[in-house]
Image (cartoon, rainbow, N blue to C red):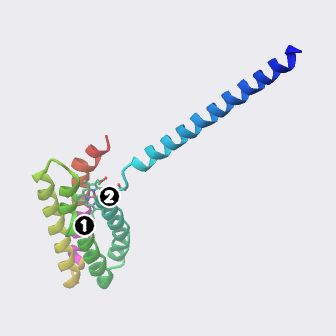
Amino acid sequence: MNYPLITVITILGVSLSIASCKKSEEEDGARVENIQTEVPVESDLAKAMKESSRVMKRLERAVKHNDWVEIEMWSQEIKEGIGGKCVELYKAENKWFASKFVILHEKFASALDTLILCSQEQNSAHLNREFNRLTESCDECHEIFHEEDED
Ligand code: HEC
């Protein structure tokens, strides 16, 4: 006579504990989602950099082919992408402001301007040198700022 009652109680107990397990799993799931949405989205500076790096590949190809129109076009696009605004973007995203960043940016901007001038003058004697100077100016800034940020 007692057996059915015990069985009912056991079943009730087991199903209750299963239900509560499920609930806490759901809660965990919700918490995980929250953490995921809190991961910072890619910074505007990183986005502008990535885009410029795509344009750099086109610029490199144009330099190889001495394509003056394209060299000027892609250089101008890089100038618009990071040349003009990367200091502002950097300032907005970093609490401490580094004047070294401005100096390295100026070096980069002047290398870019020289390359644009070179394409306007169709100066093939200096083309590779100016393009190398530009890529060096990208690398120099990354050596100091990008790799530091990654740690
Ligand atoms: C004055 C400094 C400076 C110059 C010049 C510069 N960069 Fe950057 N770059 C940075 C910094 C700082 C980051 C890290 C941004 C971040 O992760 O928020 C970065 C990141 C990048 C990234 C990685 C983006 C990512 O997170 O996926 C690429 C690609 C890149 N730069 C390409 C270039 C190219 C190409 C040039 C030259 C045409 C260039 N950069 C010139 C400072 C500079």
Element carrying mark 1: helix
- Estimate the spatial distance between the alpha carbons at disc 2 and disc 1, rounded to whole Å: 10 Å
Q: Residue at x 14, y 68 (%)?
A: 110
Dot 2 beta carbon under 8 Å from ligand 1? yes
Amino acid tagged 2: Ala
Task: Give the quarter of the figure containing the C terminus.
Answer: top left
Q: Label 2, on which residue?
A: 46
Q: Nearer the viewer, residue 98 or 56?
A: 98
Amino acid tagged 1: Ile
Q: Label 1, on which residue?
A: 82
Report which quarter residue 61 is drawn in.
bottom left
Dot 1 beta carbon under 8 Å from ligand 1? yes
Q: Residue at x 27, y 50 (%)?
A: 146
Instruction: Kindly report the secondary structure that dominates the magenta region of the rendered protein.
Output: helix
Element carrying mark 2: helix
Residue 50, given in percent of the width and then of the height, sits at 35, 62
Report which quarter residue 120 is drawn in.
bottom left
| Image: magenta residue range | 125-135
